[in-house]
Amino acid sequence: MSQRRKRKTPGRRVWVFSQLNHDLQPEQIARILVAASLEQAQREADARRLAAEMGNRHDVDGSGVEGGRHD
């Protein structure tokens, strides 16, 4: 059986958990996801601000791809 692997793009953060925590409550998971989402949104806003300061008219979303993500 072949296993699909994805490469981590430079600058992208990956969370690794050493143990599975069966005691996590939905509220705790929600807080973790919200914190990560807010951090990503801040990085994207910073990238847009920097692009605007540099006179770049292209939309930059922090993915490293001009014009946004193309997934």
Image (cartoon, helix red, strand yellow):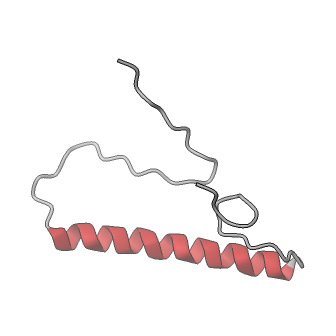
Q: Point out residue 12 in the picture as x, y percentages from the top left corner.
A: 56, 54
> In percent of the image, x 46 and y 76: which residue is there?
38
Return the residue nearer the eye: 35 or 1. 1
Residue most extreme to the left: 23
Q: Residue 8 vs residue 67: left or right?
A: left
> In percent of the image, x 65 and y 65: which residue is there?
62
> In percent of the image, x 72 and y 58: which residue is there?
65
Return the residue nearer the eye: 50 or 19. 50
Q: Residue 17 vs residue 49: left or right?
A: left
Return the residue nearer the eye: 26 or 21. 26
Q: Point out residue 28 in the picture as x, y percentages from the top left corner.
A: 21, 70
Quadrant location of the N terminus in the rendered image: top left
Q: Point out residue 53 in the picture as x, y percentages from the top left corner.
A: 84, 82
Q: Point out residue 18 in the picture as x, y percentages from the top left corner.
A: 28, 42
Residue most extreme to the front: 70
Q: How many marks?
A: 0
> In percent of the image, x 27 and y 72: which residue is there?
30
Above-or-below relation of 1 to 53: above
Quadrant location of the C terminus in the rendered image: bottom right
Residue most extreme to the top: 1
